[in-house]
Image (cartoon, rainbow, N blue to C red):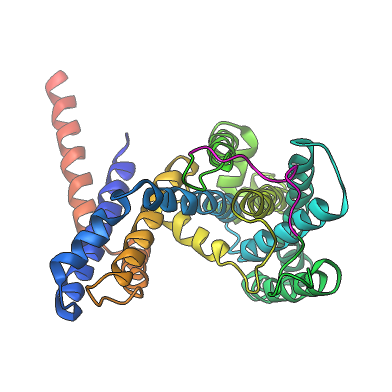
Amino acid sequence: MNKNAKFEILRTSMAIFIAIGISLVLIILVSDAPLVALRDLFFGPLTSLRRFGNVIELTIPLIITGLAVSLIFSSGQINLSTEGAFFFGGIVAMMVALAIPMPSYIHFFAAMILAGITGAIVVTIPAYLKEKTGSSEIVSSLMLNYILFFLGSYILYYYFKDPEAGINASYLFPDTFRLSVLVPGTKIHTGLFLSLISVFLGYIFLFKTSTGYKIRMVGANKMFSKYTGMKVFKITLLSQIVGGFIAGVGGAIQLAGMYKRFNWVALPGYGWDGIIVSTLAKGNPLYVPFAAFFIAYIRTGAAIMSRGESGVPPELKAITQGVIIILIVAQQFLAKYKNKMIYKESKLEIEKAGGDQ
């Protein structure tokens, strides 16, 4: 493991510990029963199979969107349309599930592929607009998310809404579309395997192929990549297509694994969560599952704590996440320690080289 990797692991760990420490102080200040609150936060998800199942159920979409964001951001594009791709991927999966009868297994995979293609198209739009018109991909992707939400809501309300449901929801999904439950008594579904397979393939693509190397080079230095003859626009577009495809697939997996009908009346938020997960994972697909599990565990623990007798509001999880992200993205956090570490190791190597001579 190189020096930079060691430092990033240390920096991320310190950011997590500091954020948890701040959360502990806040719990002690606002809670009527701080010990109960701490127990619920840190051990609540482990007190029953159902509660731990909630952690894994939340981890699945976080893995997928975290991976999608990691691939999209790897080329240097701050494209925020993962949220729209995830939502509209779900809309397309709903349409396939309800409008096109198919046999089991084939039904879900057909919906998943079409949702993925839709997600790829969605995420590519802001990147293409930036190249051809010079528009900010941040602004255009944010606006695109809401366009997709209202378009998807229109499709749901006017073509697939079940008038007998009592809420704004679609007709029930056929069993041929649903994913199997892995653990009885929970909603942990086979999407867990699909998400982990995606992580493995995403890592291979980004770090073990020449295309992935080019994507990372473009992300690190766009001008240098252009001068070396790389087709920067095509490489950037490819990273957006792959990341968008995964985000769209995530929408289909979430629907087929967790819902009996489509009832998202707002953007689900998993695309935004993917940015947090990717930031914690430092853009490395292999670290995404661990970051996703951490976020899911903290959120589940905070939800259990807020429902208990401690009197701590669930917003505490947002404070914890915010502090972690601020410290991780702060370039100067532990920068002096990094310089000292590099100096010390370099000095030892020089002394060792001198001794060998």
| Residue 257: x %, y % from top left | 61, 48
- The reply to whether residue 334 is visible in this rendering is no
Q: Which residues are magenta?
A: 172-183
Residue found farthest to the bottom: 30
Q: Residue 53 appears at what percent x and percent y?
A: 43, 48
Q: What residue is shown at x 63% (from left), y 56% (from top)?
A: 259
Identify which residue is drawn at 37% across, 65% down. 325
Residue furthest front as drawn: 164
Quadrant showing the C terminus? top left
Q: Is residue 180 magenta?
A: yes
Q: Is residue 237 magenta?
A: no
Q: Taking 14 as reference, is 129 left or right?
A: right
Q: Is residue 23 above or below residue 101?
A: below
Instruction: Name the one closer to the observer, 207 or 243.
Output: 243
Residue 91 position (above or below residue 346): below
Please indicate, yes or no, whether residue 87 appears anywhere in the rendered image: yes
